[in-house]
Image: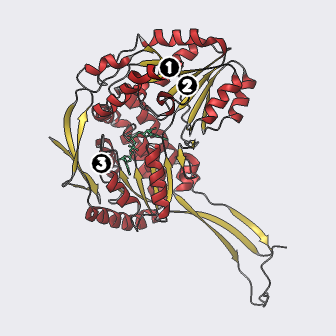
Amino acid sequence: MRQINHVVGGKTRISTGRSALVFNPATGEEIATVGFADVALIDEVVALARSAAAAWGNATLAQRTSVLFRFRQLLLDHSDELAELITQEHGKTHADALGELSRGIETVEYACGLSEHLKGSFSSQVADGVDVHSLREPVGVIVAVTPFNFPAMVPLWMTSNALAAGNAIIVKPSERDPSTTVRLAELLKEAGLPDGVFSVVHGNADTVMTLITHADIDAVSFVGSTPVAQAIYQAGTAAGKSVQALGGAKNHMVVLPDADLDVAADAAINAGYGSAGERCMAISVVVAVGDIADELVDKIATRTDALRVGPGSDPASDFGPIITGHQRDKIADYVIQAPRHGITVVRDGTDLCSRPGFFIGPSLLDHVTPGTPAYDDEIFGPVLCVVRVEDYAAAVRVVNANRYGNGVAIFTRDGNTARLFTKQVTVGMIGVNVPIPVPVASYSFGGWKDSLFGHAHIYGPEGMGFYTRSKVITTRWPSASESQIDLGFPRSR
Ligand code: NAD
């Protein structure tokens, strides 16, 4: 069986010791093993990153930009091959894998503008003969811990800006689909990145905790589920690290009575079932406002009947399997238990669970209410819940009472209400007639409430801010004749 190895100091390091199996979710077959880094290897990789960071942080802006430009081109040249790797281990369709890659490449393109993003500022004559300027320096060594559901895009979110800013970065990808990150390391080396600046170590929870609390690590970027994000934030900050930890989600799509219901139903299908619902920005709750619920549910249900569920490598598939059999069974349980909570199962996708591989079909649950497991938990599968409310105000109350605040969408033709909605909801990323409002790379990505622990959103300007530290320098060149003794506090007027 294939073995997936670490990348340490620019070289492959055979992974030995404790390990996990990697599956092809479309067949259920074991296709690889991935060994976990032990403490000695973590010490080694951090030491190599530390010494590489010193040189890389001192490389000229032009040198760093050249590497990122070449990396971008290599990602484009190898997109199909990378997408195949993603499909094989994650299960998503080839088209969807290309989609996540293109959004990851966007963040590399943003980082290519590093000479602009890293500019400091200068103020002349802030006091007599005194100037002030600021500059941004790299933080040092970053640890990046990534989830299974975007094996290329999320590592790229972190890597692009971290490298642009002059840091070394150690990525610990999900042990369920780790090969893509290893391939990214190879492409970065080919792009001319010096050895040790980008490393990959594999592992589980123990590996992550050893890494993020390591004495020689400066900052931690994490993306994954909420309980783990919270634990990482607490452990990382207690160890004195700067931490951004993005967590899970339960994204609502509010449909107002004036919306075009065909447009809304298409959007609910795309955002609810795309990638088998395994997206942190997937729509998992449709909030039907007023008397449109019956018609809207009917339109969504009819559309689910046309969805084709199959291997991600088959161009005819709309969505592929779930990452593991265990996760597939957990998802099925929410559908099976739904009637016990007064929920109507309009479409039941659990029939597909008997197929080889980790498949489950699209499910549609109606008359779902807060307080039921299907509503309260992040199911992270192809299960769309419909919550019925009387009016706009009730819809906003539902959205704001939810513990998560990653994404939300409103479907309406009323610009005024849409504008009000963007002001009233306690959610980080909002779509107006856009169901998956993942910001472009020149903005930053991040939720509110239990969807983010820490202050900095990821990529874009906030990402660049997270991977740099600022200095402010006040300068004066006095002549000996101007010099005097004055014990007062320095004043500018
Ligand atoms: P996960 O939290 O199980 O794992 C994420 C990473 O943390 C993996 O690398 C894993 O090895 C590691 N890990 C797991 N348990 C750990 C523990 N106890 N201590 C330390 N490290 C641990 O998440 P997942 O199942 O891989 O990914 C799906 C989750 O990620 C969903 O909740 C989804 O909403 C979330 N997600 C969020 C965003 C976002 O931007 N907010 C983006 C993508 C995914």
Q: Is mark 2 within 8 Å of ligand 1?
A: no
Marks 2 and 1: in contact by CB < 8 Å? yes
Q: Tell me the number on the disc at residue 94.
A: none
Secondary structure of the residue carrying tag 3 is helix
Question: In the image, what residue type sits under mark 3?
Answer: Glu
**Marks 1 and 2, Cα distance to the nearest angstrom?**
9 Å
Furthest toward the right, the residue is: 493
In the foreground, 264 or 286: 286
Question: In the image, what residue type sits under mark 2?
Answer: Thr
Can you give x and y, in whole percent of width and height, for residue 126 in the image? 77, 69
Q: Which residue is mark 3?
A: 186
* Picture quarter with the C terminus: bottom right
Could you say which quadrant of the image residue 211 lies in?
bottom left
Q: Quadrant of ligand 1?
A: top left
Q: Which residue is mark 2?
A: 369
Can you give x and y, in whole percent of width and height, for residue 210 in the image? 35, 60
Residue 11 visible somewhere in the drawing: yes
In the foreground, 485 or 3: 3
Residue 65 visible somewhere in the drawing: no
Residue mark closest to the camera, 3 vs 1: 1
Secondary structure of the residue carrying tag 1 is loop
Badge 3 or badge 1: first in the primary sequence: 3
Residue mark closest to the camera, 1 vs 2: 1
Q: Residues within 10 Å of mark 1 (few under 14, many from 20)?
A: few
Q: Is mark 3 within 8 Å of ligand 1?
A: no
Badge 3 or badge 2: first in the primary sequence: 3
Q: Residues within 10 Å of mark 2 (few under 14, many from 20)?
A: some
Q: Tell me the number on the disc at residue 342.
A: 1
In the foreground, 379 or 418: 379
Name which residue lies at 36% across and 41% down: 74
